[in-house]
């Protein structure tokens, strides 16, 4: 393989780092060891580069699997480019190398693009510790958007036969920005650790011919009132018919009504959301939920009486618990139906997607395909945005900022109110011919 994956799964990276300098490495990663020997035969110190990459991923990047994966993918791809296309160590990358790399990822060779997401870089050999390379792996993936996928699966199945030619591969502006950001942090770490003399990313980015400058206001994705009511009705009917959907109903309503990020209900290494985090406030005015949000920041979210009466109590009764949480209760808010252990974010994401699928199917059955198309690309964050947008009519911007966990009211206003944008639109519509 000209392009061979050099990193294993995220959870195996620390072990891979430990093995790299040991005699065991060639036995556990036979093809990778051979690949590194091949690169080093051309004068590039590939093992040193790989060691720096693995240290970066295990010691510098946080514990979020999504973040680690994003940094891993970009840094690995850049390292392979340096070795294979330029025959240099990543430590010798300069402005010109970075420019060529950006050209490369903007329009990669078709042979390096996979038609579908490759599930793994390596697979274990049966009854051994040996890791076998997945020969179908490619540095680039032609991903189908969620909206297109849902359209093909649930709304217009006749589109399933439409091919996905590799000629359709393109890097959008968000992906390009993410590539620059990930690469910048990787090379910054190499510079600060004195392995590189300087980080050339900022110089390249300033003159990048692909980047579109400026930023326009983009309103948050939300569900309209009719679609949201359909969510409530559909999930309630589904739960009435099959209790397995009680979890879906509670999760979706909690994300929307309590303005939560899905990560705030997920199990983490340092925190497990439990029912003990619900409590009656000391003021006696109502219930609150203690949340650990973005950046490990703690906040209190108010819990409406209607949520307590029609969502929380119903959900707890389904779980076989007392109607209301008690002080210091350690039962996970989102437990597995099999083990009772708290669920991680991937499981909750799947649950939300299943809920959206139910609503899309309901819209299609009601001959409302335009509305189904409108939410085909929806994610869990749409629920938080929907709740926040609706709440603007009921509470102040300052209170909403506290509920959302925004460090500044300005952030809340810019996202949900956007006064400057609205004033400009109002003025613009009255211009004369």
Image: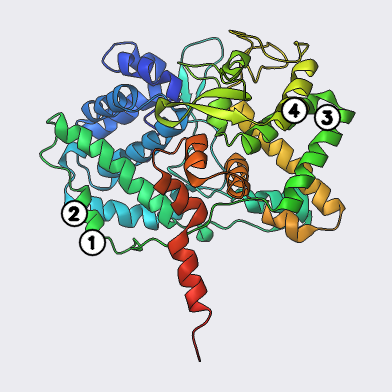
Residue 216 numbered mark, or none: none
- Residue 32 placement (x, y as % from top left): 37, 26
Between 321 and 118, the one nearer to me in the picture: 321
Q: To which residue does mark 3 refer?
A: 239
Q: To which residue does mark 4 refer?
A: 311
Q: Is residue 251 above or below residue 171?
A: above
Residue 203 numbered mark, or none: 2
Evaluate if marks 3 and 1 touch, with contact meaning CB atoms under 8 Å apart. no
Tell me which corner region of the image, top left, top right, bottom left or bottom right, holds residue 284.
top right
Evaluate if marks 3 and 2 touch, with contact meaning CB atoms under 8 Å apart. no
Q: Residue at x 38, y 57 (%)?
A: 106
Alpha-carbon neighbours of circle 1 within 10 Å: few (<14), some, or many (≥20)? few
Q: Residue at x 67, y 31 (%)?
A: 304
User: SS for tag 4?
Assistant: helix
Alpha-carbon neighbours of circle 4 within 10 Å: few (<14), some, or many (≥20)? some
- Residue 140 placement (x, y as % from top left): 45, 46
Alpha-carbon neighbours of circle 2 within 10 Å: few (<14), some, or many (≥20)? few
Q: Is residue 424 visible?
A: yes
Disc 1/disc 4 C-alpha distance (Å): 53 Å
Disc 3/disc 1 C-alpha distance (Å): 55 Å
Q: Is residue 1 visible?
A: no
Evaluate if marks 2 and 1 touch, with contact meaning CB atoms under 8 Å apart. yes
- Residue 297 placement (x, y as % from top left): 42, 27
Q: Earlier in the sequence, mark 1 or mark 4?
A: 1
Q: Nearer the viewer, mark 1 or mark 4?
A: 4
Disc 2/disc 1 C-alpha distance (Å): 7 Å
User: SS for tag 3?
Assistant: helix
Disc 3/disc 4 C-alpha distance (Å): 12 Å
Q: Say how the picture is coloured.
A: rainbow
Evaluate if marks 3 and 4 touch, with contact meaning CB atoms under 8 Å apart. no
């Amino acid at each position: 393989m000209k392009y061979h994956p050099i990193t294993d799964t995220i959870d195996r990276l620390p072990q891979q780092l430990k093995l790299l300098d040991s005699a065991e490495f060639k036995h556990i990663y036979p093809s990778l060891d051979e690949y590194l020997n091949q690169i080093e035969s051309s004068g590039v110190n590939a093992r040193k580069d790989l060691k720096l990459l693995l240290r970066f991923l295990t010691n510098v990047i946080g514990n979020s699997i999504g973040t680690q994966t994003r940094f891993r993918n970009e840094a690995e791809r850049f390292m392979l480019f340096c070795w294979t296309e330029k025959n240099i160590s990543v430590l010798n990358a300069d402005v010109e190398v970075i420019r060529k790399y950006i050209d490369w990822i903007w329009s990669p060779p078709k042979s390096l693009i996979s038609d579908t997401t490759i599930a793994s870089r390596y697979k274990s050999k049966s009854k051994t510790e040996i890791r076998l390379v997945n020969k179908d792996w490619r540095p680039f993936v032609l991903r189908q958007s969620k909206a297109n996928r849902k359209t093909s699966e649930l709304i217009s199945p006749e589109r399933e036969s439409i091919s996905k030619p590799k000629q359709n591969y393109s890097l959008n502006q968000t992906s390009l920005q993410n590539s620059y950001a990930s690469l910048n942090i990787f090379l910054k770490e190499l510079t600060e650790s004195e392995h590189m003399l300087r980080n050339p990313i900022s110089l390249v980015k300033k003159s990048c011919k692909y980047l579109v400058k400026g930023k326009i206001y983009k309103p948050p994705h939300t569900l309209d009132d009719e679609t949201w009511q359909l969510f409530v009705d559909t999930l309630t009917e589904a739960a009435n018919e099959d209790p397995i959907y009680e979890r879906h109903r509670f999760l979706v309503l909690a994300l929307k009504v309590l303005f939560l990020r899905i990560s705030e209900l997920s199990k983490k290494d340092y925190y497990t959301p439990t029912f003990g985090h619900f409590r009656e406030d000391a003021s006696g005015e109502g219930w609150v939920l203690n949340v650990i949000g973005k950046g490990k920041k703690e906040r209190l979210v108010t819990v409406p009486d209607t949520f307590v009466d029609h969502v929380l109590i119903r959900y707890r009764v389904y779980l076989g618990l007392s109607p209301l949480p008690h002080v210091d209760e350690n039962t996970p808010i989102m437990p597995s139906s099999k083990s009772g252990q708290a669920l991680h974010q991937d499981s909750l994401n799947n649950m939300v997607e299943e809920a959206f699928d139910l609503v899309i199917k309901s819209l299609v059955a009601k001959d409302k395909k335009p509305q189904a198309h409108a939410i085909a690309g929806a994610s869990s964050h749409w629920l938080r945005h929907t709740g926040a947008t609706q709440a603007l009519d009921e509470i102040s911007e300052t209170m909403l900022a506290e509920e959302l966990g925004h460090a500044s009211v300005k952030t809340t206003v810019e996202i949900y109110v956007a006064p400057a944008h609205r004033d400009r639109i109002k003025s613009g519509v009255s211009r004369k011919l």
